[in-house]
């Protein structure tokens, strides 16, 4: 997507109420909501995103910037949240 298509997508998201800087994905789990900002390799969180992420973290929520499914798995393991793969490997989480 480029140029006019990007502008149309942004306008559509704003119309739907999307907030600037809010993470791309929210997973509602038994461990509480998890917030993920998805970035392509070489891209980084914007100042607005960093501000929102810091506020969510300050409020006690888990927030991560990820670039791959491996990043998501690593973050879930760091947070002590089991996945289907880790349960099948016999790993025990608190």
Image (cartoon, rainbow, N blue to C red):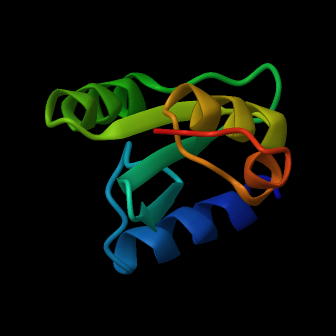
Residue depicted at x 42% and y 36%? 63
Nearest the viewer among 15 and 35 is: 35
Residue 61 in which image quadrant? top left
Residue depicted at x 38% and y 24%? 50
* Percent of width and height locating residue 15: 37, 78
* Percent of width and height locating residue 75: 61, 31
Residue 66 in which image quadrant? top right
Q: Is residue 39 left or right of residue 51?
A: right
Nearest the viewer among 20 and 6 is: 20
Instruction: Work out whether 86 lies above or below 9.
Output: above
Residue depicted at x 38% and y 68%? 14
Residue 74 in which image quadrant? top right
Total marks in image: 0
Residue depicted at x 72% and y 39%? 91
* Percent of width and height locating residue 29: 43, 64
Instruction: Work out whether 82 lies above or below 47.
Output: below
Q: In this view, does 19 lie to the left or right of 42?
A: left
* Percent of width and height locating residue 55: 20, 32
Q: In which quarter of the image is the C terminus?
A: top left
Q: In this view, does 44 lie to the left or right of 15?
A: right
Nearest the viewer among 10 and 30 is: 30
Q: In which quarter of the image is the N terminus?
A: bottom right
């Amino acid at each position: 997507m480029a140029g006019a298509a990007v502008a149309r997508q942004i306008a559509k998201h704003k119309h739907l109420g999307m907030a600037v800087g809010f993470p791309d994905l929210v997973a509602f789990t038994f461990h509480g909501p998890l917030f993920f900002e998805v970035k392509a390799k070489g891209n980084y969180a914007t100042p607005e995103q960093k501000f929102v992420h810091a506020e969510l973290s300050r409020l006690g929520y888990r927030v991560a910037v990820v670039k791959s499914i491996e990043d998501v798995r690593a973050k879930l393991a760091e947070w002590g949240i089991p996945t289907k793969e880790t349960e099948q490997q016999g790993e025990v989480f608190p």
